[in-house]
Amino acid sequence: MNPPAKKILDPVQVFEAFVAFSGNIVRVSVATDTDIETIERLAKEGQWHTRIKQLDELGMNNREETQRALNNGVNYIQATRLRSLIDRLIRHLGECSTEELMAKLTTEKGEWKTRSVTDLVKAAEAVQLMTQRALGQNPASDSNGKNKTSSIALSVMAALNASTDLGLDSVEVVKQQLAPPHDSGDRISPTAG
């Protein structure tokens, strides 16, 4: 039988609980499964009681609103970190040669593997929504008040499949599917003079 894994202390998690419980060390201990002595040491080293006092002063009129603003700030930072990770993945794909990219996105039989691309698009959209929410913006919603589900990933998948199935240019298909609708009378004919 293996010995139980040693619990890794996450000071950020302990501090978040410390703030949530207004410095009540017993509640923090129970919530984070951390011994009281460790919490007291972290609180002293990080001057957490002073920070709680500052938080109370900030939120004298409305502590709940102040806590919400702090949570939004933390959420924005997390969304920014995730966006940075996704940007690195996109940059990596963009730096590949055409041959390398084709090798990564096709099977040995030459069929498109669209799952990774659509997952990346979904992740980018999720981070955009997280950022909007953290900034207090409401993501677009439909007429029923429900959040719209993305069709971007489906458009990308359809475009990539179209290039093999129908012999179409996948970039053009994506452009057409994502372009905003226009009234047919607004279009300029290439032969019009």
Image (cartoon, rainbow, N blue to C red):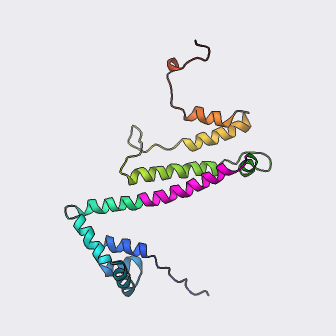
Residue sitting nearer the eye, 156 or 90: 90
Q: Residue furthest top?
A: 193
Query: Residue 96: within the magenta?
Result: yes
Query: Residue 45: within the magenta?
Result: no
Q: Position of residue 137 (x, y in %)?
A: 37, 48
The answer to whether residue 96 is seen in the rendering is yes
User: In which image quadrant can residue 41 be found?
Assistant: bottom left
Residue at image position (50%, 17%) is: 185
Q: Is residue 105 above or below residue 158?
A: below
Report the predominant secondary structure element of the magenta stretch: helix
Q: Residue furthest right?
A: 109
Q: Is residue 181 above or below residue 135?
A: above
Give the quadrant of the N terminus. bottom right
Is 167 on the left-hand or right-hand side of 130?
A: right
Residue at image position (32%, 80%) is: 25
Q: Position of residue 191 (x, y in %)?
A: 62, 14
Give the quadrant of the C terminus. top right
Q: Position of residue 77 (x, y in %)?
A: 43, 60
Residue at image position (44%, 53%) is: 130
Q: Which residues are magenta?
A: 76-97
Q: Is residue 25 above or below residue 126?
A: below
